Amino acid sequence: MTALLTLPIALPLGAAALSVVVGRWRVAQRVIGLVTLTALLGTSIALLVLVDRDGAEATQAGGWSAPFGITLVADRLAAVMLVVSMVMLLAVLVYAIGQGGEERRHVGFHPVYLALTAGVSAAFLTGDLFNLFVSFEVMLTSSYVLLTLGGRRDQVRSGMTYVVISLVASALFLTALAFVYAATGTVNLADLAVKFTDLPVGVRQALGLLLLVVFGIKAAVFPLFFWLPDSYPTAPTAITAVFAALLTKVGFYAIVRTQTVLLPPDDRPQTLLLAIAGATMLVGVLGAIAQNDIKRILSFLIVSGIGYMVMGLGLFTVAGVAGAVFFIIHHVIVMTALFLTGGLLEQRTGTGHLDRLGGLIRTAPALALAFLVAGLNLAGVPPLPGFVAKFALVDAGIDGGWWAVVAVSLLVSLLTLFSMTKIWTGAFWGDVEPAVDLHRPVPLAMLAPTTSLVALSLALTLFAGPLYGLAERAATDLLDASTYVQTVLGS
């Protein structure tokens, strides 16, 4: 078990170093990246199976007992996030290799991509706030390099926005760490769960709110989302897919972890979180409707999706949190598929602007079908898994009597369907724009991961029952912090 907990961090870091050594041989870099991510996917699946069967597991780096050492801990949520992340990262790497572009021109693409993988894995597995901060900084450094590969002016400008906002969030995170340590004398999450109960109520709530702001910036919740739609669309499609589908989910994961482990049930900001959820859903989808570029539409829909996740968390019930966990699985896969499909469209036509597209259903029917399936899935049309995820959240909201946020979530689902219809009618219906070249080749290495993710999103429907059962077990663990504490600190 110790190896399964350490490999998701150590293996990509070692592979990144090896990829630097063989930087002159691009084929070797590709082999290293693909083998590493395939191994990490297998390791993550094995970890999920063991954790789901035997319960959460923890290990202490260097033999130092918690809370003094570096703790790595995996429960069901962490293991699920690892598996979904590795599926997405592997698919996107294959896509990037097929696309060429910056992956082919820049020797640093593969090492930085693997370093980003290590940062993501560490964020899910770390058991203390300081190493969570380190994980975010590894992701920040790697993502900034990937975001600005190519050096175009719009990329650098958007990259600067991204890095400035991220640095502000990092400064706030360090401030929060200082306050937490001054109040409790520890940054270990399990130890904090115990010591937070001894703090005055006002201090607990203030620290919880500060951490919510820090991770809210990372997750792009309302009103802290403004940086995302301007930062993501300028990057290459593969990088945009990674950022869109995964990095905001890491921020949401940190919100879930801190709000459930650190705060007792009576101190959790339920009303505030549900208000943020409703605003995030609504603002995101309205922003999407107002756009005319496929990447920008999808970027705003990321924000809207985060709102659904926050809604599930804000209910603080097993049904609500389980719905949020299931929604994460669905959203990561579907959003990745949509961004990659949008990239295929740009590869074929040379543009993503809807006013310059049209008629692709006749010239690229397979691409049209892939987008249609993924788009309807995102909108939550039955019987697709997007419907299952949203139905679980709506049902949990009705049971809790939170009618306002339920009404907003239903309205946003309809508006999401409208935004998908906007892309469909603009890009795949209507007349072909003469200025657009519809005969550019689409490499198999780009097509294969895209269609695989679309197929996987459909397969979620077949396995919705077992997956929701896993989500319920993860939610039960999250809402009972004593299990996490006992795993890390012992009896």
Image: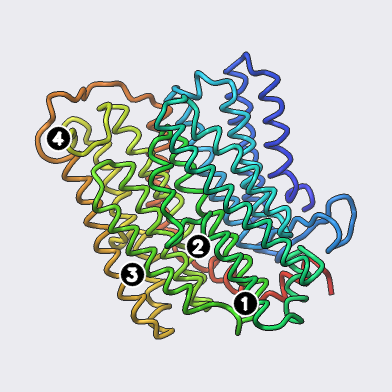
Residue 311, above or below 227: below
Kindly identify which numbered label has been placed on residue 372: none
In the figure, 392 relative to 33: above or below? below
* Mark 1: amino acid: Gln
**Residue at the spot x=62%, y=50% of the render?**
45
The quadrant holding residue 370 is top left
Q: Is residue 390 left or right of residue 161?
A: left
What type is the residue that disc 2 sits on?
Leu
First in sequence, mark 2 or 4: give its number: 4
Label 1 environment density (alpha carbons within 10 Å; few <14, some 14–19, many ≥20): some
Q: Nearer the viewer, residue 107 or 338?
A: 107
* Label at residue 359: 4
Disc 3 to disc 4, C-alpha distance: 32 Å
| Mark carried by residue 205 | 1
**Three-letter amino acid code at the position of disc 4:** Gly
Q: CA distance from mark 2 to mark 3?
A: 22 Å
Which of labels 2 and 3 is toward the front? Answer: 3
Q: Secondary structure at mark 3?
A: helix
Tell me, for residue 467, which label it has, or none. 2
In this rendering, the label closer to the viewer, 1 or 4: 1
Closer mark to the observer between disc 2 and disc 1: 1
Q: CA distance from mark 1 to mark 3?
A: 27 Å
Total numbered circles: 4
Q: How is the image coloured?
A: rainbow
Look at mark 3 in the image and give the residue it sits on. Answer: 409
